[in-house]
Image (cartoon, helix red, strand yellow):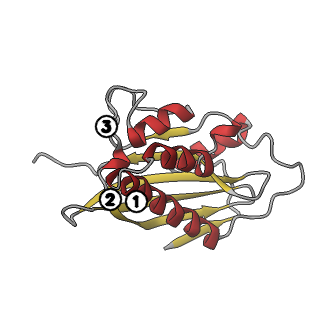
Amino acid sequence: MKIYSKRLLFNPMRSTPIIFLLIIQMAGFSEGMDRQAPLPISEAELLAAQKTWGEAIVSIGKAYTQRQDYKAEAIKTVDELYDYAAGPVLFKPTKAAKNQFRSSRESAISYFVGGEIAEDHGFALQPWSAVRFENSAIILEESFAAAMGNYFFTNAKSGVEAKVEYSFIYRRDSQGALRIQLHHSSLPYQPEH
């Protein structure tokens, strides 16, 4: 795993994620944070946030199969892990075709458990028994952290893993918790030749 920190954000030769970071900084997504300098986000915090997200996806599916309140689990997940309370979140889920982008809290909940958007069948209702992250690289800065790589979802019924590509950007909120501001997820390219 490679860790980059204290990098210059604007460099036209860098890849697209750096542009996303610049846009987030310029768009004022950090509004509402204390005006004091935020504590830098550590690698341990980023890894813990990824672990928490994976456990939450498993928990939603488990609640569904045990006939518990899985929608409440999804609401808790979105409210505690994503940054919708501060404004729109840049969320592009894996299995979204007609409504590809989920900038509202309600549309994110719908993606995980179905409901608001017709194409949503509840990604977290699969169910999954485990989610593991393999970071290709992470970026740690004073007010945000970013990670890109593959995560693997283990089907609770078959045990087969599904490989999915991701990019996440986190910021620290005024209470000190990491919140997801950008979440892009897609299936790997499958060449036809």
Within-10-Å neighbours for mark 3: few <14, some 14–19, many 20+: some
**Mark 3 vs mark 1, CA separation in Å:** 16 Å
- The foreground one among 44 and 135 is 44
From this viewpoint, is residue 61 visible? yes
Estimate the x, y position of residue 130 in percent, counting from the top left. 36, 66
Query: What percent of the width, then of the height, locates residue 51?
Result: 50, 66
First of labels 2, 3 by sequence position: 3
**Quadrant in the picture for residue 4:** bottom right
Q: Residues within 10 Å of mark 2 (few under 14, many from 20)?
A: many
- Mark sitting earlier along the chain (3/1): 1
Disc 2/disc 3 C-alpha distance (Å): 14 Å
- Residue type indicated by callout 3: His
Query: Is 65 situated above or below 140?
Result: above
Q: Which label sits on residue 82?
A: none
Q: Which three-letter amino acid code belongs to the residue tagged 2?
A: Trp
Crowd class of label 1 (few under 14; some 14 to 19; many from 20; radius 10 Å): many
Specify which label sits upstream in the sequence, 1 or 2: 1
Q: Which residue is mark 3?
A: 121
Marks 1,2: beta carbons within 8 A: yes
Residue at x 70% of width, y 34% of height = 27
Residue on which disc 1 sits: 58
Mark 2 lies on a secondary structure that is: strand
- Residue 44 placement, left or right of 174: left
The location of residue 183, given as percent across then percent down, is 50, 46
> What's the amino acid at mark 1?
Val
For label 2, the residue is 128
